[in-house]
Image (spheres, rainbow, N blue to C red):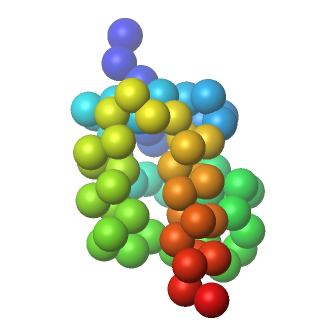
């Protein structure tokens, strides 16, 4: 059964799949992991679409890495 990005529980170990979608459920996960300052940007969304075999934890770490590089 395919993962439902709208309603299934997302954890750090949830794999990124070809069916990945930017949903409010995903946004809530990122806000929990990365803080209220989290926001999607085009480069992260592109990374998410190509990060097959990565996890949502990897994605949160990537967002944090990108944010730290901006400073």
Quarter in which the C terminus is drawn: bottom right
Q: Residue at x 45, y 41 (%)?
A: 6
Rendering quarter of residue 2: top left
Say if 15 sits above or below 25 in the image: above
Q: Is residue 60 visible?
A: yes
x and y, in percent, of residue 18 in the image:
26, 32
Q: Residue at x 56, y 79 (%)?
A: 69
Q: Residue at x 53, y 57 (%)?
A: 62
x and y, in percent, of residue 5 in the image:
44, 38
Which residue of the protein is positioned furthest toward the top in this rendering? 1
Say if 61 sits above or below 13 in the image: below
Rendering quarter of residue 44: bottom left
Q: Is residue 8 visible?
A: no
Quarter in which the N terminus is drawn: top left
Say if 15 sits above or below 27 in the image: above
x and y, in percent, of residue 10 in the image:
60, 36
Rendering quarter of residue 30: bottom right
How many marks on residues? 0
Q: Residue at x 27, y 59 (%)?
A: 46
x and y, in percent, of residue 25 in the image:
54, 49
**Would residue 35 appear left or right of 3 to someone viewing this image?**
right
**Would residue 6 appear left or right of 12 to someone viewing this image?**
left
């Amino acid at each position: 059964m395919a993962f439902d990005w709208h309603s299934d529980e997302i954890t750090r170990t949830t794999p990124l799949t070809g069916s990945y979608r930017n949903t409010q459920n995903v946004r809530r996960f990122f806000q929990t992991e990365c803080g209220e300052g989290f926001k999607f940007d085009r480069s992260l969304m592109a990374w998410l679409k190509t990060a097959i075999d990565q996890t949502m934890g990897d994605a949160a770490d990537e967002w944090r890495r990108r944010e730290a590089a901006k400073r």
